[in-house]
Amino acid sequence: MRYSRSMNIYFSGIGGVAIGPLAELAHDAGHSVQGSDAHSSLETSELMQRGIVVTNDQSGDYLEYCHKQRRIDWLVYTAALPADHPELVRAQKLGIYTAKRDELLRYIMSEKNLKMIAIAGTHGKTTTTGMMIWVLRQLGVPISYSIGTTISFGPSGHYAPNSEYFIYECDEFDRNFLHFSPYLSLITSIDYDHPDTYPTQAAYTRAFQQFLGQSELSILWKKDTLTGLEPVNKSWVLKDEEVKSFRIPGWHNRANATLVAKACERLKLGNPDIVKVAVENFPGTQRRFERLAPGLYSDYGHHPAEIYATLQMAHEISREVTLVYQPHQNVRQHEIQSMYTNEVFRYADSVYWLPTYLTRENPDLPILTPADLTKNLTRPEVHIASLNDDLWKSIMLDRELGKLVLCMGAGTIDEWLRQHLKI
């Protein structure tokens, strides 16, 4: 393991929503950064605009070339990378130290003496992290941060030399959040997810319980304690009636904004009236109810609770809502298929249901079809669809009729939309 003041770091999967911001953070912190990704994305474009070299060559040849030019101290890789990935294999052959993202992040935080403000939870992490970054910037508080998306008001990852706090979208996948001991943790919500990491609801809740125990301070919702989560010392437990009446659409967004306001109160940062104005002027984040065109929105949500919450927000804007939904990961669908109920889709007038986007799958599980997943829905009207010209024509027609079209999913649906809109 090699630590030095200025390291040469190679990121495998640098375009990922977790790895990319970390690369930007390391770059700002004075380290030399380069990396690879199989696909180009908004994140890789942002990285290259900042002068970070990104290649699509993941054979290991480019890694070795960089190593010969200047010795690579660390290869940091995404948890989604298989153990036999060519770059991991080549790094081991070359004697390059390899680590997941949490190890590098812990090193940077220790080196720069940063206090972590962690935003964790099943839903709402990205929006709440974005709000926290935005509000503290409006308050003039120097901050460092990492958020799992692109934002309009700064890079996805940033280190400010005079910052005391590091704001982190702290996700539970691969037990990432358990590698940290935050100064303050915000828990947005708890619904069972990531069955590939947590085989049972109980295992999922235990992980959050451990995370709370590792946090010096925490703020969470009382409803989440009903899942078996127990508050620890210095926990603020909020009730639903404490959700502030911020002038922003969506009950869940107002709840997330309340967490941000309570965090500012707990940290004694800013006047509540200034915080309120900042929250109500939050410009949003990419792929979180993002308006791509008039009447057309893109959202990353892929869990029934997220579907319900985002449809409720859409319904506050338009009384007629069409949902285009791409489920994510077949193994997840086996766990949540019973949760697709009429109540989840109550705010949608019609649904176009796409085949599941497949990633990190268990080959022994049969692929659940759209018909399998929608068999218990009696309303709204469900159309089995594909990402093709027929679907695009239906989307255009609904927009022409004045409907709000909400496209949801963590797979390829967002890229497909942008290609058709050419944005």
Image (cartoon, rainbow, N blue to C red):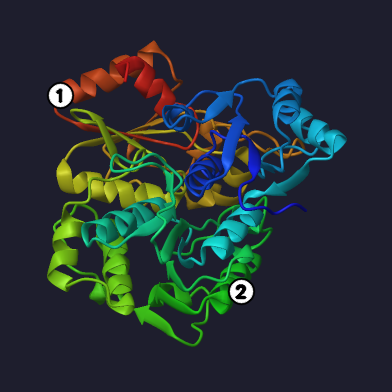
Q: Which of 98 and 247 is in front in this view?
A: 98
- Return the x and y of residue 355 as percentages of the image width and height: 52, 28
User: Residue 31 vs residue 123: left or right?
Assistant: right
Q: Can you tell which quarter of the image residue 175 is in?
A: bottom right
Q: How crowded is mark 1: few (under 14 residues within 10 Å), some or many (20 or more)?
A: few
- Return the x and y of residue 29 as percentages of the image width and height: 50, 50
Q: Which residue is drawn at 46% across and 58% down?
A: 168
User: Residue 32 vs residue 312: left or right?
Assistant: right
- Return the x and y of residue 151 as percentages of the image width and height: 34, 41
Mark 1 or 2: in front is 2
Picture layout, residue 420 above or below residue 33: above
User: What is the number of the mark on residue 270?
Assistant: none
> What residue occupies the far top of the structure in this picture?
389
Q: Which residue is drawn at 52% across and 62% down?
A: 112
Picture layout, residue 275 above or below residue 419: below
User: What is the number of the mark on residue 210?
Assistant: 2
User: Residue 95 vs residue 23: left or right?
Assistant: right
For label 2, the SS is: helix
Q: Which of 339 and 277 is in front in this view?
A: 277
Q: For the residue marked with disc 1, what is the amino acid?
A: Leu
Residue for badge 1: 401
Picture layout, residue 384 above or below residue 342: above
